[in-house]
Image (cartoon, rainbow, N blue to C red):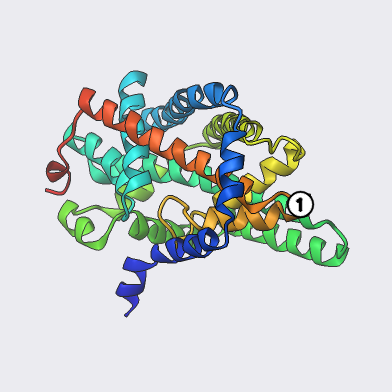
Amino acid sequence: MKKIIEKYSFLIGLFILTIIIYRLDFSALYFCFKKINYLPLIPAVFLTLPLIFIKSWRWNYLKKIQGINYSLIDSFLMYGIGMAIGSFTPGRLGEISKIGYLKNDGYSIGQSLVSVIIDRLSDLFFLITFGYFGIIFLFGFSEKITSVFSIIIFIIIILAFIVKKQFIRQLIKKIFSILIPLRYQKTWKVNFQDLLNGIKKYRPKNYFYFFLITLFSWIIYYIQIYFFAKSTHLDIIPPIYLIITITVSSLITLLPLSFLGIGTRETTLIILFSSFNINTETIVLFSQLILLDYLLIGIIGAIFWKIKPLPLKQLFK
């Protein structure tokens, strides 16, 4: 039963989207579509490549610390392919595809997996941290005691990461099991200790450096989102509110409840934008522009695949 739920959980998002579509006023949606300002879409589209480049720059930096040396261009191509596959397939194959390139070039899976895990955690940590304080900002500090208590809990969790080595070990093991399905763990014969040893190579200055790169990548993404909002005339929303809303939405779409965030993203945006009296049709249109950006990443990934192909059957040998 559990396996069935995990396999088809993405249908929840499609079900939610069906309900939203059923409640839409299609004449109003068509009117919103006709009012789209296409000019802001030009810089929004062009920001996709710099976004992939910055993320690949971060991954390239992570790999070099592991003694895995690739040119920035190669990392750019591999990362773009990984983002594309990760966007369109279940089972986190996007992450696995990046490991496959390194495996194909003779690097061990344990060594290769370190950079992929840290890269993934960088975005996740940013979303959780910024999203947490963003929620407090959105709902205010009316309950001061509750807010202070939640911050204390947050600090305790962070300290647990730093102090409790066993806790960290179990966390990494859990992330490892999520990223790599059990059948591939057995096929690849991954040495978990190699994975831990690889993580120990990173120093505080390394974490600080790739946190800055992560922050920079998210700034570019927020600018891209602003252009999407401007295109659909949602620029009436204060930028800081828009940024926090998108952060919370991105965090929620990480839940395995939808495909490409379909359904969950629209629901989150409708709820969080409700205080601005914006009609549902405009919000859905805005969300679809974000979805189109995923499709654009897929097209870019397909082009990159032509330049630097990797047969997936080699990946799972």
Left or right of 139, for residue 218: left
Location of residue 302 in the rendering, given as x and y in whole percent from the top left corner: 27, 31
Mark 1 lies on residue:
277
Taking the spot 48% from the left edge, 47% from the top edge, the residue there is 121
Above or below residue 135? Residue 306 is above
Which one is in front, 85 or 28? 28
- The single residue placed furthest to the front in the displayed view is 27
Location of residue 84 in the rendering, given as x and y in whole percent from the top left corner: 34, 38
Location of residue 274 in the rendering, given as x and y in whole percent from the top left corner: 73, 55
Q: Quick one: label 1, few (<14), some, or many (20+) residues within 10 Å?
A: few
Location of residue 12 in the rendering, given as x and y in whole percent from the top left corner: 44, 66
Above or below residue 145? Residue 249 is above
Q: Element type at marker 1?
A: loop
The quadrant of the image that shows the N terminus is bottom left
Above or below residue 220? Residue 243 is below
**Which quarter of the figure has residue 285?**
top right
Give, as a three-letter code, the residue at label 1: Asn
Left or right of 249, for residue 303: left
Taking the spot 41% from the left edge, 29% from the top edge, the residue there is 56
Which one is in front, 266 or 216? 266
Taking the spot 62% from the left edge, 34% from the top edge, the residue there is 35
Taking the spot 55% from the left edge, 31% from the top edge, the residue there is 217
Which one is in front, 201 or 105? 105
